[in-house]
Every structure is written in C-alpha cells, then in structure tokens.
Amino acid sequence: MSELPEPLVPAEVDIREYRFMMLDVNRLRDSRLARNSKGEEFRAAVLLWCAAWHQVPAASLPDDDSELAGFAGFGRVIKEWMKVKAGAMSGWVLCSDNRWYHPVVAERALEAWDSIRMQEWKRECDRIRKENTGRKERNEPLLEIPQRPAPLSGGKAGRVPTERRRVSGGKPAENPPNETEQNGTESKIEPKPQPQDSFVRVREGDPDKVVVAKRFLALRDELWPGAGRLAAPRMTIETEALAYLTDGAPAAVLWEVIDSLMRDRKDRDPAAPPGSLAAFKLSLPGKLKQYQRTKDGAGNVEGAGHGGSRPAQPNSDDKWGPWAKVAPRLRSFGAGDEWSAAWGPPPGHQRCQIPKAMIVEILGIEHAARIGIAAEGVAS
C-alpha cells in the first residue's frame, strides 16, 4: 500500500467566517465531473464541496461514510449514498490525517486563509505603529513591526505533489509561517496563530469595537458550541458595535448588555445562536438605556477597565420567592424583547399566573396598564 500524501491544507486553517466560496464557472463547466457524472452524483458533489469549506481543516471531509452521507444530502440512508459515492467523490484525495481533501477547494481555502492572515497582520502592524508613536514621545524602545506572512496559496495547494514534503529537507522558504517549525528558532512573531487566538482572544490595545466583536464570538462559541448556523464575519460585528459606541454607549456597558441578552437568548431558545448584534437590534437600544438609568440611580462606579459592573439589582428579586427567576424575563419584556412562548402566557394574558404586583413593579404602572393590569387594588 502506497504512503498517503500529506494534507493539502494545514491543520489550523479555519475559514468558517467566510460564508461564500469562489466558483470558477469555466473550470466547473469543462470539468470531467460535469461531463460524466449523473444528476444525483453532481448534486452530492456540490454539497460535499460546501460542507468541506466549513470543516477544520478547510477543504477536507472525514473518512466516514455515515458522515459523508449526511453532508451529501442522504441523511442516514448510507445505502443510497454508496450508490453515488464514486461519482460524487471524484477528485478527492485521502491524505495521511485520514481525511479527504479536494484540491480545487483547497486552493480556494488557502486563498481565503491568506486573506485572513493578511488582515490580522495589517491590524497588528497598525496597532504597533500607534503604540510606537506613544513610545517615541516617552523615549521608550520601539516595538518591532512583524514580517509580512508568506502566502500559502499560489497554485501549489491544488496538487498532491511530492514537493509538499520538502519541509523535511532542503533550504526552507524565507520566513514560512505555514511550515512545521523544524529548527525552533524562527522570527519574533508567533508562527501559525490559531484562529481562536487571532479572532477571539482579546489583546491589549484592541479598539473597543474589536473587543466587543471578539467577546461576542467567544461567548457564542461557549453558549452554542458546534452551532450549525454560522456567525457573521467579525468585521460585520465590529461595524454593528461601532454604531452603538458612536451613539455614546460605553464599551463596558455595551458588552454587559450584550452578554445578558445572549445568555437570556440561550435560556429561551437553545437552538438559535445569534449571527451578529443584529439579532438584538430591537431590544439592545432599550436595554442600554435601561442599564444606564439603573446604574445611574444606584450610583455605581463606571466599569471601565474591568469589564463593567452589572446593573444594581441586588437580591431584591428574592422577595418574589419562586417567581424570582421570572424577574429578568419581565425586565427583558419591558425593554422591548418578545415574550417567549416557552415562558408560558405573557403578562396581561388571562391565563398568566405571574403576580400582578410583580408585573406592575417591574414593568411600571404605565406599561402594566397598557397590557390590561391596573395598579389600583394590587397588593404589594
């Protein structure tokens, strides 16, 4: 049995934030797959490309027919999948990590990964330049600008050649961040940053919009691990966060409110992770105002630098006894959020069992009156 080739894509390549994959229409139209495959084979092949795009490493699939059947649209009917497998898997290569790789999808994946790495490198260079401006004024040593990352794409990724094995011999390429560190003495920058390090871990000096976006993505992964629905690109989330920051929301307050909304959403609907801050566009503005009013009324200290402090709602909810857990839902409802059907009949409904005194106190007299609950005669 011949030795399996090395993977066509490095193990850390994660491009799940890229929702779109470039399609070379001429290449596909003139391909052997388009000429020779049957309809079901062609459909399954395209679905497999899409599935591989968001696997880690990108452009790969597991060597498991039960999983491949699901990716190809056959669900658990492996028998039907096996009928089209040969045609649908045309062009795929089984590599030494026991995963299948498609050379063309690998080309596109490496191009996307290069783009991600270049964006991170540019941001890091901008951060260091800004830092060095202050260091010059303070007569402190300047930080070194990291070297430009060497691209992984460029045509070679699309083949299954022996040249990918050259990392173990010969003269290595100049500053190759994609190579396995054989000599252990590379440049001062961190080689091959993991996606979670580049995109989720908050670094000192990150702008507020970046901090909010990174925390959003990190908390999303924590609350909805392995979510099928993809998050929006981080740049989109940064733009959304910037709009709130520009309107005057302190970064610490903005994050505390987003944190609360995400955890509340997890309780309400565990199967629906938010794609971006747009998921909270109806409730977030009202929550920010409510948070600020509560904080100002309690005389809390501004939470800058330590993640903020939560609204001053000490254990006053305990007075409601077994209904205490409903208090956050009422506040969310009062701020404009929808009342989840999972919580039972909403306030104002004739079958709602929440104490009216609790509804009036938390929602306020005017809001309670609008939903048919009068404050008069309500026992506190």
Image (tube, rainbow, N blue to C red):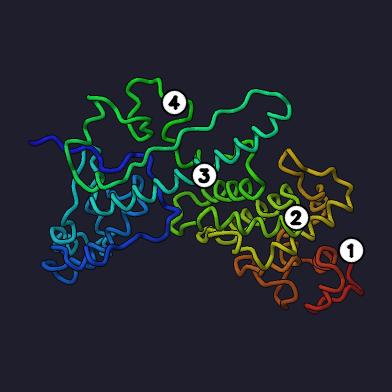
Q: Which residue is mark 3?
A: 199
Q: Amino acid at mark 3?
A: Phe
Q: Secondary structure at mark 2?
A: loop
Q: Amino acid at mark 2?
A: Ala
Q: Which residue is mark 4?
A: 187
Q: Quadrant of residue 46?
A: bottom left
Residue 145 image position (x, y, % from top left): 53, 32
Marks 4, 2: nearer the viewer: 4
- Which is nearer the N-term, disc 4 or disc 3? 4
User: How far is disc 3 from disc 1 in space, using C-alphas?
Assistant: 49 Å
Q: Image height check: is 350 above or below 289? A: below
Q: Residue at x 55, y 28 (%)?
A: 144
Mark seen at residue 111: none
- Which is nearer the N-term, disc 2 or disc 3? 3
Q: Which residue is mark 1?
A: 380
Q: Image height check: is 115 above or below 285? A: above
Q: Amino acid at mark 1?
A: Ser
Residue 155 image position (x, y, % from top left): 26, 47
Q: Which residue is mark 2?
A: 249
- Between 147 and 348, the one lying in front of the other is 147
